[in-house]
Amino acid sequence: KSSESVGRSFSTRALNFALGGESDSVEGADSVAGLKQTIILHVLLFFPLIAAWVSLSYTGQVDKGYGMLLVCQFCAFSITTDVTNQTLSTWMGAPMALTAIQACLTFIMLGTWAAWTSGERLGF
């Protein structure tokens, strides 16, 4: 096995162990997180972050916790994106299609955002 394959299967096995279940993986896949595990992971990582952002926003102390919450949110996003991409690319059987779809959606979202912000600045 390649080192990337070993790393991926290790992270997925760790996720399976942490969430206390076996994966409902596709045939032929070594070890891929299932839908239930992926959803639980998103809830476990993002619910506390959302609660912290709302709490800091409500109390007006966003400046105090901004740096720490931003770092935690980036880590949570990285972990959930990796697990979700592993699962989707295995289930779809076409990792390049997944990458192309993500690239197109990113281009559309960033293009829309750039047009919106530039339009406001230029008076459109």
Image: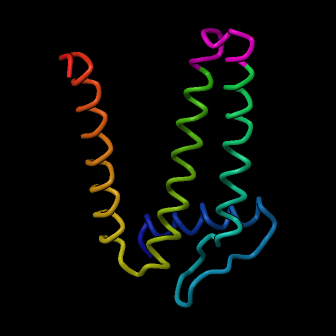
Percent position of residue 46, x then y: 67, 42
Taking the magenta stretch, the answer to whether it contains residue 107 is no
Q: Residue at x 55, y 60 (%)?
A: 83
| Position above or below: 46 against 124 | below
Task: Choose between 92 and 123: the one closer to the eye.
Answer: 123
Q: Quadrant of residue 59?
A: top right
Q: Residue at x 53, y 70 (%)?
A: 87
| Position above or below: 2 against 25 | above
**In the displayed image of the protein, which residue is found farthest to the bottom?**
27
Which quadrant holds the C terminus? Answer: top left
Left or right relative to 45: residue 80: left
Q: Main secondary structure of the magenta part?
A: helix
Task: Choose between 30 and 36: the one closer to the eye.
Answer: 36
| Position above or below: 25 against 81 | below
Q: Residue at x 66, y 52 (%)?
A: 42
Q: Quadrant of residue 58?
A: top right
Taking the magenta stretch, the answer to whether it contains residue 63 is yes
Q: Which residues are magenta?
A: 56-67
